[in-house]
Image: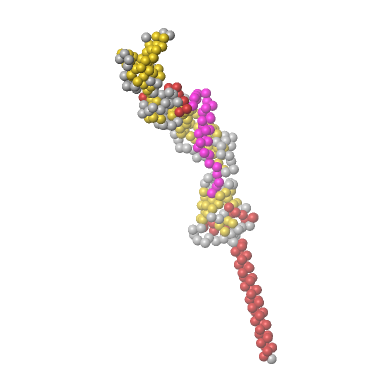
């Protein structure tokens, strides 16, 4: 009899344990299902459209709820901050399985955008001004107003056009209205003001040269500089400096002043030279000594070392002086 009672108790205990395990398993399954259905807040959201949707803020929501529109998106390039109270109101209104973990919970919603580069702005203005009949030659532009901030939706091209232009030839200033991405589809507009800066080509050296270096054509490049920076003693043509030598040193990339260069000295004071006597078809040579420094074409004094006679001649080559009678 006792054995049968013990058997019955043992079976009941097993059944109880089995049911308990089933209950605990069901609890874990339900908890897991709830966790799987819980929404999570994104740390940051970058959107490209005109509207803000639930799916832009929360992950782990159904497709139907993710597509729900909450309101307009920020302007292109702008941010919108949604704090914990605002997010909780959204979750409660839409029956979303989400609660803030703290009052510091928030999300930054950023509208993707295309920013028009200032170089494209300058190019558009330059093109519009160059098409006018009262703007001539090379020029650069200097904006006197703040650089325009032109931001269009990300899906639009990063282009800009001049919608209107006013130019004063006397003062060389302009006012313009810019439109992006185009005049026909002006999503944004901005006003700019500036001046036309005239440019002139001047020769400069590619590399720094010093006294004694002969400036060749391959040493020279032409660069643009504002006319307003032009000085009266700047050498403006390549032929003005080719064949000359710096008096001391001439730096690369800078306009060259007349006083900075000179003809290379072909004869030095005290140098022995070849005297070339020219008299009609007759040409004679003799040995002489220079009494002055001289470059090509300079008239210098010298002495014939044979006759000890002092004469004058023109420097015609390296250590060569020509005397005509």
Residue 102 x, y percent position in the rendering: 50, 61
Residue 30 x, y percent position in the rendering: 62, 67
Residue 271 x, y percent position in the rendering: 34, 22
Residue at the location (52% across, 48% down)? 79
Please state which of residues 47 and 235 is positioned toward the viewer in this rendering: 235
Whether the magenta-drawn stretch holds residue 121 is answered as: yes
Residue at the location (55% across, 47% down)? 111
Residue at the location (69% across, 88% down)? 4
From the image, which quarter does the N terminus lie in?
Answer: bottom right
Please state which of residues 198 and 94 is positioned toward the viewer in this rendering: 198
Q: Kindly tell me whether residue 231 is visible in this rendering.
A: no
Q: Kindly tell me whether residue 181 is visible in this rendering.
A: yes
Tell me: residue 180, above or below residue 263: below
Q: Residue furthest top?
A: 280
Q: Residue furthest front?
A: 306
From the image, which quarter does the C terminus lie in?
Answer: top left
Q: Report how many numbered discs are placed on residues in the image.
A: 0
Residue at the location (54% across, 49% down)? 110
Q: Residue furthest bottom?
A: 1
Whether the magenta-drawn stretch holds residue 115 is answered as: yes
Rendering quarter of residue 277:
top left
Please state which of residues 150 and 185 is positioned toward the viewer in this rendering: 150
Magenta residues span 110-138
Q: How is the image coloured?
A: secondary structure
Tell me: residue 225, above or below residue 319: below
Residue 91 x, y percent position in the rendering: 57, 58
Tell me: residue 260, above or below residue 155: above
């Amino acid at each position: 009899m006792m054995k049968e009672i013990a058997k019955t108790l043992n079976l009941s205990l097993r059944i109880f344990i089995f049911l308990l395990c089933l209950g605990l398993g069901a609890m874990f399954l339900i908890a897991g299902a709830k966790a799987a259905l819980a929404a999570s807040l994104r740390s940051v959201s970058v959107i490209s459209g005109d509207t803000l949707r639930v799916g832009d803020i929360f992950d782990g929501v159904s497709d139907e709820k993710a597509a729900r529109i909450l309101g307009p998106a920020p302007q292109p390039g702008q941010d919108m901050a949604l704090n914990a109270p605002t997010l909780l109101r959204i979750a409660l209104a839409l029956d979303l399985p989400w609660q803030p973990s703290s009052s510091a919970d928030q999300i930054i919603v950023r509208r993707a955008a295309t920013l028009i580069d200032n170089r494209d702005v300058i190019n558009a203005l330059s093109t519009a001004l160059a098409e006018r009949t009262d703007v001539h030659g090379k020029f650069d532009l200097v904006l006197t107003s703040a650089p325009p901030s032109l931001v269009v939706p990300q899906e639009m091209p990063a282009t800009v056009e001049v919608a209107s232009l006013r130019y004063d030839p006397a003062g060389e200033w302009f006012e313009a209205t810019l439109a992006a991405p185009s005049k026909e589809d002006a999503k944004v507009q901005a006003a700019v003001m500036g001046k036309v800066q005239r440019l002139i080509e001047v020769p400069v050296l590619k590399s720094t040269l010093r006294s004694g270096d002969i400036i060749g054509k391959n040493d020279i490049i032409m660069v643009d500089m504002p006319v307003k920076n032009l000085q009266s003693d700047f050498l403006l043509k390549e032929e003005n400096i080719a064949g000359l030598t710096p008096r001391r040193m001439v730096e690369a990339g800078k306009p060259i002043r007349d006083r900075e260069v000179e003809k290379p000295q072909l004869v030095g004071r005290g140098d022995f030279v070849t005297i070339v006597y020219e008299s009609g078809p007759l040409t004679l040579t003799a040995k002489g000594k220079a009494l002055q420094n001289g470059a090509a074409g300079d008239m210098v004094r010298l002495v014939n070392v044979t006759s000890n006679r002092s004469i004058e001649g023109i420097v015609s080559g390296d250590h060569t002086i020509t005397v005509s009678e």
